[in-house]
Image: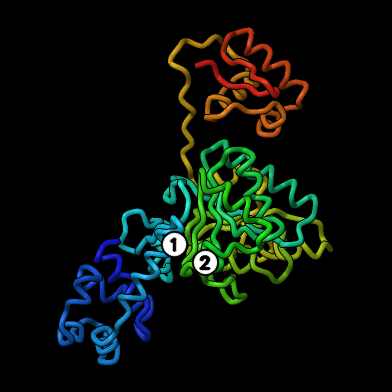
Amino acid sequence: MTEELVHQLSLELIPGVGPKGVKQLISYCGSASEVIRAPKNQLLKIPGIGYKMAEAVKTANTSKEAERIIRISEKKEIDLLHFTDPRYPKKLKQIHDAPNILYLKGKGDINPLRTIAVVGARKATSYGKSITEQIVSELGLIGVTVVSGLAYGIDIHAHKAALKNDIPTFAIIAGGLDRIYPSSHKKYAEEMQEQGGLVSESVPGTKPDPHLFPVRNRIIAGISDATIVVEAAERGGALITANLANSYGRMVFAVPGDVGNILSEGANKLIASQKALIYTGVEDLIYHLEWKINQIERSSRDLPDLSAEEEEIYTLLLQNKKALEIDVIALRSQISINQVASILLGLEFKDLIKSLPGKKYEVVK
């Protein structure tokens, strides 16, 4: 617990200052500690800081509450990232209403090179769930971190698909990180902390009240390069996230659905109103976001000539740290499982991969 962190959180807790006021104060003074130490007449010289706000800063007594919150967070292994922290998500920092303090739990990189939000209806159809799994598996092939909201439906299926494919995923939580909602998703929230994590702007212990859900959607939109809407009714959280992403100048993609299906109305209207691009595959992201996707580095040894399918599967295995099951390889490569089995056997004969118990395969080191 550093003095600066205590002062940063203390400023956040002062009534009447607000996120914009805190940013303005720190911007002019250089740090939260300098704000706390500055005399009132100096604070009054800062543009936008009136007498009431300056008086509030000088008379506030929020340091003990700040220390209490930090101690609780440390006990629960929750990190506090202030807006000035170099670890604070760079993409999120670019939006005008980014939270000043984030609560983070997990081992994953909160500043990955590529981040995509996958959101949609809470009452997802079997088609929506299936297409979500396909989208996430494709994203994993190009090193994308998946972001969603841990809600029922498309959100949790995006997280589960990421976990299944060893893809980093972050859940943006409405409420404290120790108050996972829905509770049935707690096991997934714990599992994703190994390669990703949980993010919230709420103090630990905060209940996941309804008004916090639309507010947290701005973090989902702001922390991501783009948002993909899989299924959405005409009104719902997914459309709020999409509209926020548009307002931040971030791209929105939507998976078109059946005309007349209530869960397709939102996505179809986004496309019809030109608020979203049609998503047909990962190539759409690469093209519109102008991503430069480098070839995965190959083994240092000389490789024999490989067919296109052999090279695709070898590269897939080379990219993953863990061995992959044959059905996962078939799903990610979009090659039939019978053909995959034949290709894997050929790669084994060439001494490039090896089979493991449970029909798993990995590259020979």
- Asked which quadrant contains residue 254, the reply is bottom right
Q: Is residue 335 above or below residue 167?
A: above
Question: In this orientation, which residue lies closer to the viewer: 85 or 248?
Answer: 85
Q: Which residue is mark 2?
A: 176
On the question of residue 231 being in view, the answer is yes
Residue 250 in the image: x percent, y percent? Answer: 50, 59
Could you tell me the amino acid type at mark 2? Gly
Q: Is residue 226 found left or right of 80 in the rendered image?
A: right
Q: Position of residue 38 (x, y in %)?
A: 17, 79
Q: CA distance from mark 1 to mark 2?
A: 8 Å
Q: Amino acid at mark 1?
A: Tyr
- The vertical placement of 72 against 113, above or below, is below
Q: Earlier in the sequence, mark 1 or mark 2?
A: 1
The percent position of residue 241, horizontal first and vertical second, equals: 58, 65
Q: Which residue is mark 1?
A: 103
Cβ atoms at labels 1 and 2 below 8 Å apart: yes
Residue 141, image x, y percentages = 57, 36
Mark 1 neighbour density, 10 Å: few (under 14) some (14–19) many (20 or more): many
At 61% from the left edge and 54% from the top edge, which residue is drawn? 118
Residue displayed at 37% across by 78% down: 13
**Tag 2 secondary structure:** loop
- Is residue 287 at least partly visible in the picture? no
- The answer to whether residue 365 is above or below residue 179 is above
Mark 2 closeness class: few <14, some 14–19, many ≥20 residues within 10 Å: many
State the residue lying farthest toward the bottom. 51
